[in-house]
Image (cartoon, helix red, strand yellow):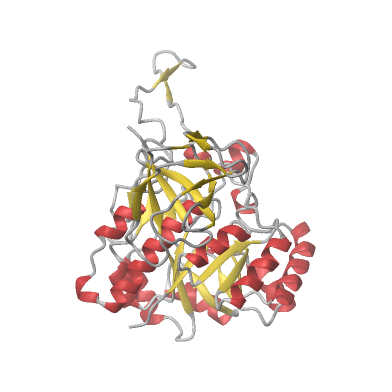
């Protein structure tokens, strides 16, 4: 069977390296101001470094210019297209038909990928984009498996299909939403979403006998997040998706942490490889357990299995994980002491897990001692006070640079 590409988000050069380390075949990143995540730390020089690094290790980078552009954006779009052509990016993700035309004019050698923002939910739409120069379309997340299968069976043979398998679901249709612009003056379609769908709302009704008098609708403490959705998770459905022949499986989250990337990419990398190697014994539960250790909302299959699925609302409205958090990242390893860049409070006695690339089983251990990196003095606890702060500890196994550690929270 054909093994699909595993595509991960890269909000920065460092995050791209983590994604590649933990098994991504490709990453997608934004340009500095023309993608739907303008708050991601990926400026033009970081993007150049990312592309060069990826090509050295045989990986790919796709870059998004997927805003819905006003006319006054097109000069910058032309300049970005020329720059990306010179950088030899592996694909440009586009939603706006006008931007597609500009990319084909200014970067004719770069494949065009049609963003999920374009709402491709039929093989008719997929065929339209193919006729207009697209090499790949990224399907809308609203599709169920029968609809995806129909697209796969009726699309042009040389048109690639990409779909989301994990991450946040937008309140809007395939991400096209005006709520943020309306409430906060920040357009989601120009890369500056305020995530208004994640806010808590109070609901009032006008009392019939007293016009103009508003009465609050009673609700419990979980009833105010009326727009916020759970996160998509299709780890159980990997066999069906691979069998369909989908070309690329995409993880959402350019603003997520390196810890999130390591955990999620590693889980799906192992799931895809294990299924392709031994389809009869695929057991999604061990990968699901790893995914549940990340900071996330509730998980849902959205509409993939059932278009009538109602289990999509996140009533708590927030990302959370009660048991685990980002502990740190390996900087340098020696058998005696390993230097760790810390991301949360660490104490002697804490239970840690080392996430090993291309291995679903983690290495669990307890911190026996901590040492100040500069003085070598023993300390009981360390709190992250500045970016890049480090501590030293002994690891139970050999580790490599950039391997991620998670900390099990104390009750």
In the rendered image, which quarter contains the C terminus? top left
Q: Could you say where residue 43 lies in the image, as x and y percent from the top left? A: 70, 58
Query: Dividing the picture into quarters, in which one does residue 180 lie?
Result: top right
Q: Residue at x 46, y 30 (%)?
A: 201
In the rendered image, which quarter contains the N terminus? bottom left
Going by the image, does 285 lie left or right of 410? Answer: left
Task: Report the front residue among 363 and 113.
Answer: 363
Q: Residue at x 36, y 30 (%)?
A: 223
Q: Could you say where residue 306 lies in the image, as x and y percent from the top left? A: 27, 58
Q: Residue furthest top?
A: 210
Q: Could you say where residue 3 lies in the image, as x and y percent from the top left? A: 38, 78
Task: Report the front residue among 387 and 291.
Answer: 387
Q: Residue furthest left?
A: 280
Task: Report the front residue among 31 and 308.
Answer: 31
Give the number of marks: 0
Q: Is residue 59 above or below residue 28?
A: below
Answer yes or no: is residue 296 visible: no
Q: Residue furthest bottom?
A: 157
Going by the image, does 108 lie left or right of 330? Answer: right
Q: Could you say where residue 172 lies in the image, as x and y percent from the top left? A: 49, 50
Q: Is residue 218 above or below residue 97?
A: above
Q: Residue at x 40, y 75 (%)?
A: 246
Answer yes or no: is residue 96 visible: yes
Task: Report the front residue among 248 and 175.
Answer: 248
């Amino acid at each position: 069977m054909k093994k699909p590409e595993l595509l991960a988000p890269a909000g920065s050069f460092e995050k791209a390296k983590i994604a590649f380390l933990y098994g991504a075949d490709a990453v997608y990143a934004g340009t500095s101001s023309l993608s739907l995540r303008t708050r991601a730390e990926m400026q033009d020089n970081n993007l150049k470094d990312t592309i060069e690094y990826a090509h050295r290790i045989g990986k790919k980078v796709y870059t998004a210019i997927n805003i819905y552009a006003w006319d006054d954006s097109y000069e910058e779009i032309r300049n970005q297209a020329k720059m990306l052509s010179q950088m030899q990016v592996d694909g440009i993700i586009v939603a706006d038909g006008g931007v597609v035309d500009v990319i084909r004019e200014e970067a004719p050698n770069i494949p065009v990928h049609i963003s999920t923002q374009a709402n491709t939910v039929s093989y008719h739409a997929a065929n339209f984009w193919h006729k207009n120069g697209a090499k790949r379309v990224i399907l809308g997340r609203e599709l169920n498996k029968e609809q995806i299968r129909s697209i796969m069976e009726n699309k042009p043979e040389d048109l690639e299909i990409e779909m989301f398998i994990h991450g946040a679901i937008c309140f809007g249709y395939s991400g096209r939403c005006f709520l943020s612009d309306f409430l906060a003056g920040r357009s989601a379609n120009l890369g500056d979403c305020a995530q208004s769908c994640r806010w808590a709302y109070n609901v009032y009704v006008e009392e019939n006998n007293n016009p103009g008098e508003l009465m609050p609708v009673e609700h419990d403490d979980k009833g105010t997040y009326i727009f916020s959705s759970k996160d998509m998770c299709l780890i159980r459905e990997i066999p069906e998706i691979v069998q369909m022949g989908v070309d690329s499986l995409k993880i959402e989250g350019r603003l997520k942490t390196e810890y999130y990337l390591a955990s999620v990419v590693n889980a799906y990398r192992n799931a895809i490889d294990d299924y392709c190697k031994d389809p009869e014994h695929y057991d999604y539960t061990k990968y699901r357990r790893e995914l549940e250790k990340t900071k996330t909302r509730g998980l849902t299959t959205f509409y993939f299995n059932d278009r009538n699925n109602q289990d999509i609302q996140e009533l708590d409205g927030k990302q959370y994980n009660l048991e685990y958090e980002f502990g740190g990242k390996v900087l340098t390893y020696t058998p005696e002491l390993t230097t760790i860049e810390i991301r949360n409070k660490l104490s002697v006695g804490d239970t840690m897990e080392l996430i090993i690339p291309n291995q679903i089983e983690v290495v669990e251990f307890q911190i026996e001692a901590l040492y100040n990196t500069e003085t070598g003095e023993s300390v009981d606890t360390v709190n992250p006070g500045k970016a890049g702060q480090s501590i030293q500890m002994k690891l139970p196994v050999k580790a490599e640079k950039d391997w991620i550690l998670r900390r099990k929270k104390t009750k």
